[in-house]
Amino acid sequence: MTDLTVTNSRAADGTPTLTATGEIDLSNVAEFAGALAEGVGAGTPLTVDLTGVAYLDSAALNALFTHAGQIRIVAGRLLLPVLRICGLTELTTVVQR
């Protein structure tokens, strides 16, 4: 299993935030998808912080697409091209950090 840490929390302004660190692939996507589903259940847009993610595969992208209308993604330079090419940037806010 690939190393992944996911944490649901609230930012200082109260925004629900999911922070992922490591790599997201088929071996651990269920954990990531579960945390996403839990986070979007709050009713307000969920900030998904992927700045600590070095790799994500199509299963991870599918999990993000499932909730595209309810999330805002923060990603580093490494993931931005992937998010752009797959079309997530057309469906939700994606910002670089």
Image: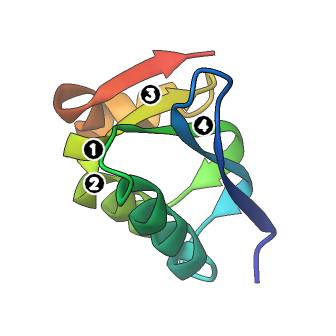
Measure how far apart labels 4 and 1 are at the Cα level. 14 Å
- 44 versus 13 height, above or below: below
Q: Where is residue 76 in the image (x, y as percent from the top left)?
A: 63, 25
Crowding near the residue tagged with mark 3, few <14, some 14–19, many ≥20 C-alpha atoms within 10 Å: few
Whichever of callouts 2 and 3 sits on the residue coming sooner in the sequence is 2
The residue wearing badge 2 is 67
Crowding near the residue tagged with mark 1, few <14, some 14–19, many ≥20 C-alpha atoms within 10 Å: many
What residue lies at 53% left-to-right and 27% top-to-bottom? Answer: 74
Q: Name which residue type carries label 4.
A: Asp
What residue lies at 76% left-to-right and 74% top-to-bottom? Answer: 2
Q: Quadrant of residue 66?
A: bottom left
Q: Name which residue type carries label 2.
A: His
Q: Which of marks 2 and 3 is in front?
A: 2
Whichever of callouts 4 and 3 sits on the residue coming sooner in the sequence is 4
Q: In which quarter of the image is residue 96?
A: top right
Q: Position of residue 13 (x, y in %)?
A: 59, 21
Which one is in front, 37 or 49?
Answer: 37
The residue wearing badge 3 is 81
Measure how far apart labels 2 and 3 are at the Cα level. 19 Å
Quadrant of the drawing holding the N terminus = bottom right
Measure how far apart labels 4 and 3 are at the Cα level. 16 Å
Q: Nearer the viewer, mark 4 or mark 3?
A: 4
